[in-house]
Image (tube, rainbow, N blue to C red):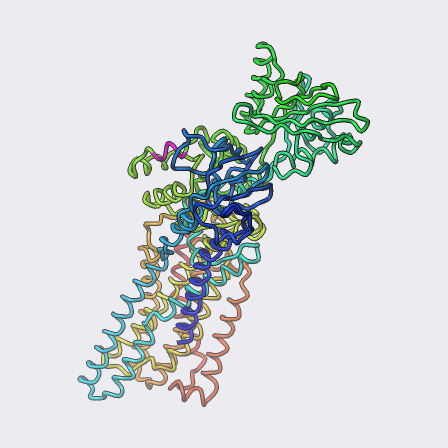
């Protein structure tokens, strides 16, 4: 009953934590908001925003609702929570030809979405959707519609326990009736039936399952992996497909300046100092940005400028920014006009899309073609590229248009969201272990393919986009996910659909992610894994496992742990099944043969002092087999209680049963008292029981070969069992309680020989397999 309430408590606690995802989602979608109502500007709680409100958006604001822009100045929004795209997207006011069904992602659209972040500029927007009708609200609805599934191991164990319990109770009743009718001793029949029920009822299975998974979760926690759903520990070892979100999972979700190009020279930034010839390019790139930048690419330029260039920005020399020229629909570039302290000099610095900068500089066709080749090569590396240009107008002029400046081309800046350290090695380890790695991201296809190649994802030669997915039926999608490893421009509903298609193909799916957009897919996957440091609350609450330090290599350690748990669980359950066969046989055969009963309830209780810790703690502590990460994932269609487990257990238990029953029959045949025969048989059973523990430590190595593997619990159980047996055989009070007589040295030697012989055949079989 204690274990029943323990398991119930764990289940209730885990369900409560999982459903906190909706509460976290509500908290995330309720920032403060500035709105205009009845011509009056006021600040209200985000949850109080309604359709029809006018939102005033400024740099650094969290958008409280989905809205359509009616005016905007230099507005850029970080939508990575919804799309997974690292780079902020530009926003422009609404036109009549804009789509009526907005989706996050993409530049120059007039829509802003709840929970996204304004990183640049200002704007005014008309609220169009709140709550469940917003894009982030739809994710909440998707989460609510998903319920956690039982793992194959849980379903199989529950089904087996039900079958064994029904069979055991039926046999128990049959023994009581047969014993009572044939011997007229109904009290003896009741004791025999109770003994049989204690012997074969599968009470250890739920306990062993909980202990294995909880100790596996504890071991994972030492590797900085938090387990929110214990069953995921074992399921991780059966994983066949690893679906990986790019931004924040494979990459750092932090733009860095990776490459600079100026004066026909390309330089890739590393730990060495930036050559002086590139200093003006970085300097002017910073001066074309906001003074205190929020935009990730502007921040990247500022980070590089400070330690590397050694050139103080002109803003620190007293120059003043007197005018800003924001991006427009017709020109994807921005400029800042600066004037010297004495007002005698001026210069303009521009940055933006390379094509727009080429246009501002009025470059000849030959120069455009040359620079376009450089641009194509940088883009092929997955870099986001900005062009930089400068002009030196008269200090007393204030042009109204950027084209009025006489710009000169300065160079190109290439930005990259870098791959996390250790990710390529972790992906290689996963693929060696037979896992298929699939990238699912909201980012650009070129960027996704570049990252996929950088980390070593197999067959990363093409990417399927979200637009492609929309055109596929469920049947066609199931075929497509079987041969495509990179998916880009994918929205949350499509991530969920991809996971469900992989599951429909019979795959055991692991999904990693850190954004709000990942939450439905995390919850729908067999195992959802969230990032702990950079991940959102919604992603963490929807996941089964959380990588506390965001170390992707911890995921591979989790797979190793999952496989170890399954292997050891299989050995432990095989031992439990094997040891119950002689116990059941020693209860049933005396009833059928009208012999004196061998086992009484006190004997069963003693045996459980060995079986329970051996089946749980001893086998759980076993080290993994040497080939645990070099073999493919186990077939999810093959049950835990498969033919090999049943065959091994039946043969092991059957041989022990024949040996101990033969001992009992021989003792009775020699005319020894029932207490003598019972003591001999029980002692041989204990020796065989300990032998089964050693034999099942490994199905590949012999018991002698496993002695080098450390397992403290094994020796506690072994010496504890022998010690208790010695006490029972030597202490008169305990002998009387167990209905034993005093054994002679020859009897003890016979027990040792018989108990050892009953399991040594399995060691010979393992030795023969290893040599063959």
523 or 101, nearer to the observer: 101
Q: Where is residue 457 in the image (x, y as percent from the top left)?
A: 48, 35
Q: Is residue 475 left or right of residue 733?
A: left
| Residue at 45 percent of width and 28 percent of height | 461
In the image, residue 260 lies in the stretch drawn in magenta: no
Q: Position of residue 330 (x, y in %)?
A: 53, 23
Q: In this view, does 240 lie above or below 698?
A: above
| Residue at 42 percent of width and 71 percent of height | 611
State the count of labels: 0
Q: Is residue 702 visible?
A: no
When asked about the image quadrant of residue 193, the answer is bottom left
Q: Tell me which secondary structure the magenta stretch mostly adopts.
A: helix
Q: In this view, does 161 lie to the left or right of 386?
A: left
Q: Is residue 206 left or right of residue 334?
A: left
The furthest residue to the left: 181
Q: Position of residue 16 (x, y in %)?
A: 44, 63
89 or 57, nearer to the observer: 57
Q: Can residue 417 be seen in this view?
A: yes
When asked about the image quadrant of residue 654, the answer is bottom left
| Residue at 32 percent of width and 77 percent of height | 664
377 or 166, nearer to the observer: 377
Q: Where is residue 42 in the image (x, y as percent from the top left)?
A: 55, 50
When asked about the image quadrant of residue 500, the answer is top left
Query: Which quadrant, please, contains the N terminus?
Result: bottom left
| Residue at 80 percent of width and 22 percent of height | 344
747 or 148, nearer to the observer: 148
Q: In this view, does 693 lie to the left or right of 264?
A: left
- Report the magenta residues as a range: 466-470
The furthest residue to the right: 342
Q: In this view, does 455 lie above or below 396?
A: below
């Amino acid at each position: 009953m204690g274990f029943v309430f323990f398991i119930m408590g764990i289940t209730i606690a885990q369900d409560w934590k999982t459903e906190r995802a909706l509460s976290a989602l509500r908290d995330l979608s309720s920032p403060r908001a500035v709105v205009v109502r009845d011509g009056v500007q006021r600040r209200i709680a985000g949850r109080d925003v309604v359709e029809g409100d006018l939102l005033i958006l400024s740099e650094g604001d969290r958008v409280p609702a989905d809205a359509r822009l009616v005016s905007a100045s230099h507005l850029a929004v970080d939508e990575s929570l919804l799309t997974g795209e690292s780079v902020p997207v530009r926003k422009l006011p609404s036109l009549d030809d804009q789509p009526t069904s907005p989706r996050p992602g993409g530049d120059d659209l007039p829509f802003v979405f709840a929970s996204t972040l304004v990183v640049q500029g200002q704007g005014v927007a008309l609220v169009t959707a709140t709550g469940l009708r917003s894009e982030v609200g739809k994710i909440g609805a998707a989460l609510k519609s998903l319920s956690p599934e039982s793992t194959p191991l849980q379903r199989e164990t529950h089904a087996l326990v039900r079958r064994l319990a029904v069979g055991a109770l039926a046999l128990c009743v049959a023994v009581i009736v047969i014993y009572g009718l044939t011997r007229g001793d109904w009290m003896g029949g009741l004791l025999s039936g109770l003994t049989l029920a204690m012997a074969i009822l599968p009470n250890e299975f739920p306990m062993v399952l909980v202990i294995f998974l909880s100790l596996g979760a504890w071991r994972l926690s030492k590797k900085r992996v938090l387990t929110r759903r214990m069953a995921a520990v074992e399921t991780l070892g059966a994983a066949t497909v690893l679906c990986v979100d790019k931004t924040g999972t494979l990459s750092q979700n932090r733009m860095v300046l990776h490459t600079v190009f100026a004066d026909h020279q390309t330089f890739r930034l590393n730990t060495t100092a930036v050559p002086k010839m590139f200093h003006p390019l970085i300097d002017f790139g910073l001066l074309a940005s906001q003074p205190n930048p929020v935009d990730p690419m502007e921040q990247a330029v500022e980070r590089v400028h400070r330690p590397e260039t050694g050139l103080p920005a002109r803003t620190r020399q007293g120059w003043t920014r007197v005018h800003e020229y924001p991006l427009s629909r017709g020109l994807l570039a921005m400029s800042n006009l600066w004037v010297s302290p004495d007002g005698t000099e001026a210069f303009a610095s521009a940055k933006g899309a390379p094509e727009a900068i080429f246009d501002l500089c009025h470059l000849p066709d030959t120069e455009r073609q040359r620079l376009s080749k450089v641009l194509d090569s940088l883009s092929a590396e997955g870099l986001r590229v900005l062009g930089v240009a400068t002009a030196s107008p008269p200090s007393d002029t204030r042009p109204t248009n950027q084209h009025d400046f006489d710009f000169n081309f300065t160079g190109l800046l290439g930005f990259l969201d870098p791959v996390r350290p250790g990710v390529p090695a972790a992906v290689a380890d996963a693929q060696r272990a037979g896992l298929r790695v699939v990238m699912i991201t909201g980012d650009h296809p070129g960027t996704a393919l570049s990252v996929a190649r950088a980390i070593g994802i197999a067959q990363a030669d093409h990417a399927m986009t979200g637009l492609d997915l929309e055109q596929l039926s469920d049947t066609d999608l199931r075929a497509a996910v079987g041969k495509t490893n990179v998916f880009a421009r994918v929205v949350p509903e499509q991530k969920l659909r991809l996971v469900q298609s992989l599951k429909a193909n019979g795959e055991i799916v692991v999904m990693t992610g850190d954004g709000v957009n990942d939450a439905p897919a995390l919850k729908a996957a067999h195992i959802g894994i969230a990032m702990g440091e950079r991940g959102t609350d919604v992603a963490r609450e929807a996941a089964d496992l959380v990588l506390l330090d965001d170390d992707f290599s911890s995921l591979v350690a989790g797979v190793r742990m999952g496989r170890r748990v399954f292997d050891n669980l299989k050995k432990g359950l095989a031992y439990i099944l094997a040891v119950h066969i002689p116990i059941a046989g020693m209860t049933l055969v005396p009833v059928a043969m009208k012999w004196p009963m061998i086992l009484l309830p006190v004997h069963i209780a003693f045996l459980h002092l060995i079986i329970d810790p051996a089946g749980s703690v001893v086998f759980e502590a076993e080290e993994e087999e040497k080939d645990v990460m070099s073999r493919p994932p186990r077939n999810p269609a093959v049950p835990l209680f498969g033919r090999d487990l049943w065959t091994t257990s039946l043969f092991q238990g059957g041989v022990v049963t024949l040996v101990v029953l033969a001992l009992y029959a021989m003792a009775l045949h020699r005319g020894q008292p029932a207490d003598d025969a019972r003591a001999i048989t029980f002692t041989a059973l204990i020796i065989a029981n300990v032998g089964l523990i050693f034999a099942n430590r490994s199905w590949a190595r012999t018991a002698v070969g496993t002695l080098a593997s450390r397992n403290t619990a094994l020796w506690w159980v072994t010496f504890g069992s022998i010690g208790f047996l010695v006490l029972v055989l030597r202490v008169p009070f305990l002998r009387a309680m167990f209905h034993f007589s005093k054994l002679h040295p020859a009897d003890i030697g016979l027990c040792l020989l018989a108990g050892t012989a009953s399991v040594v055949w399995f060691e010979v079989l393992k030795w023969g397999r290893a040599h063959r």
